[in-house]
Image (cartoon, rainbow, N blue to C red):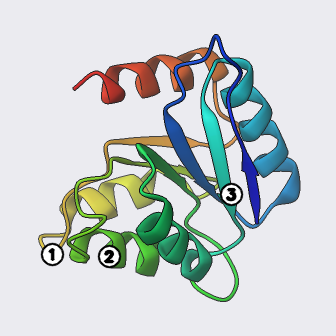
Amino acid sequence: MNDKTAGPAGTGRKILIVDDEPDVVTYLTTLLEDNGYATITAADGREGFARAKTERPDLITLDISMPEESGVKAFRQLQGEPATKGIPIIIVTGISADFERFIRSRKQVEPPAAYFEKPIDPEKFLETIRKILVK
């Protein structure tokens, strides 16, 4: 669990990073904070769901393949919970693009706001976040 706030020049928009890989969490935290975002982290889907309900982030980045509770289950829970249903979710995962097609084909859940395979392109990632947060 980690909480860091953006500097005075930042937008202060809060992003929850849910990933079990410490190197990915560090990379995304640094990338986002260097670009003016506040970050919160969670190591699995269960913790991510709980933090999303209490912290009410502006956006969530969510890994799919994690121990304890998968990102798929967390994704469904986040969309089913009234307090978190409207929070945009970006899937950031090492799983192939086949998974993107699968999740977008599910009728029970809305598709994610965006999907990125690891390793991410940082410029495209930041541009996508900017576009999502101005909606």
Q: Are marks 2 and 3 in contact (CB under 8 Å)?
A: no
Q: Are marks 1 and 2 in contact (CB under 8 Å)?
A: yes
Callout in the foreground (2, 3)? 3
Which residue corresponds to mark 3? 41
Q: Locate the N terminus and report the quarter of the image it occupies.
A: bottom right
Count up the numbered dots: 3
Callout in the foreground (1, 2)? 2
Q: Is residue 116 above or below residue 106?
A: above
Picture coordinates of residue 135, whole percent (x, y): 21, 26
| Callout 2 secondary element | helix
Q: Is residue 70 visible?
A: no
Q: Give the residue type at disc 1.
A: Gln
Query: Which residue appears at 80% of the width and 38% of the height?
Result: 27
Query: Which residue appears at 66% of the width and 16% of the height?
Result: 8
Q: Give the residue type at disc 2.
A: Arg
Query: Which residue appears at 43% of the width and 81% of the height?
Result: 73
Give the CA separation, mark 2 to mark 3.
19 Å
Comes first in the chain, label 2 or label 3: 3
Which residue corresponds to mark 2? 76
| Callout 1 secondary element | loop
Nearer to me, 85 or 14:
14
Picture coordinates of residue 4, whole percent (x, y): 74, 43
Comes first in the chain, label 3 or label 1: 3
Q: Is residue 100 visible?
A: yes
Which residue corresponds to mark 1? 108
Give the CA separation, mark 1 to mark 2.
8 Å
